[in-house]
C-alpha cells in the first residue's frame, strides 16, 4: 500500500509543478503585455508633445510674420481724394 501512496504523491507533485509552471508562464505573458502597452503609451505621449510643440512654433511664426509684415511699395494702389460736386 505504501508503494501506491508514494506513486500518488509523485503524480500529485508532478501535476502541481506543471500547474505552477503554467501559472508562471501566464504571469510572465501578462507582464510582457503590460510593458508593451506602457511603451506604446510612452511613444504616443512623446508624439503628442512633438505635435503640440510644432503647432505652437508654427503659430508663433505666423504671429511674428503677421506683426512684422509691412505692405510693399509696389503693391499700393493710389486712390484720388473724393471731391464734392459743385452746387450741392
Image (spheres, helix red, strand yellow):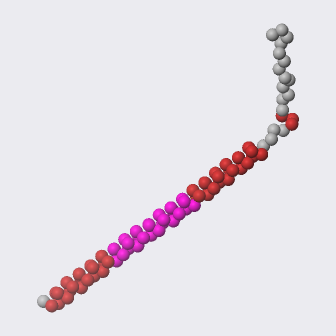
Instruction: Give the residue drawn at x 36%, y 75%.
Output: 24
Percent across and percent down for residue 20 are: 32, 77
Write the start and end of the magenta stretch as one range.
21-46
Q: Nearer the viewer, residue 25 or 40?
A: 40
Question: Image height check: is 29 above or below 53?
Answer: below
Q: Nearer the viewer, residue 47 or 9?
A: 47
The total of numbered circles placed on residues is: 0
Q: Residue furthest front?
A: 88
User: Going by the image, does 85 lie left or right of 61?
Assistant: right
Q: Nearer the viewer, residue 72 or 35?
A: 72
Percent across and percent down for residue 29 are: 41, 70
Q: Is residue 24 magenta?
A: yes
- Kindly indicate the quadrant of the structure image that contains residue 34: bottom left
Percent across and percent down for residue 5 are: 17, 87
Q: Residue furthest bottom?
A: 2
Q: Quadrant of the N terminus?
A: bottom left
User: Going by the image, does 37 lie left or right of 83?
Assistant: left
Question: Image height check: is 66 above or below 48?
Answer: above
Instruction: Give the residue drawn at x 74%, y 45%.
Output: 67
Please name the predominant secondary structure of the magenta segment in the image. Answer: helix
Q: Quadrant of the C terminus?
A: top right
Q: Is residue 26 magenta?
A: yes
Percent across and percent down for residue 53 are: 63, 56
User: Going by the image, does 81 lie left or right of 61?
Assistant: right
Instruction: Give the residue drawn at x 51%, y 65%.
Output: 39
Question: Image height check: is 86 above or below 58?
Answer: above
User: Going by the image, does 42 lie left or right of 83?
Assistant: left
Instruction: Give the residue drawn at x 84%, y 38%.
Output: 72
Question: Image height check: is 2 above or below 19?
Answer: below
Amino acid at each position: 500500500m505504501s508503494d501506491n501512496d508514494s506513486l500518488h504523491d509523485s503524480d500529485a507533485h508532478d501535476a502541481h509543478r506543471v500547474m505552477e509552471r503554467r501559472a508562471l508562464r501566464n504571469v510572465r505573458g501578462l507582464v510582457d503585455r503590460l510593458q508593451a502597452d506602457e511603451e506604446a503609451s510612452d511613444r504616443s505621449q512623446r508624439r503628442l508633445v512633438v505635435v503640440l510643440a510644432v503647432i505652437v512654433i508654427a503659430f508663433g511664426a505666423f504671429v511674428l510674420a503677421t506683426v512684422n509684415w509691412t505692405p510693399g511699395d509696389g503693391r499700393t494702389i493710389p486712390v484720388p481724394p473724393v471731391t464734392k460736386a459743385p452746387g450741392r
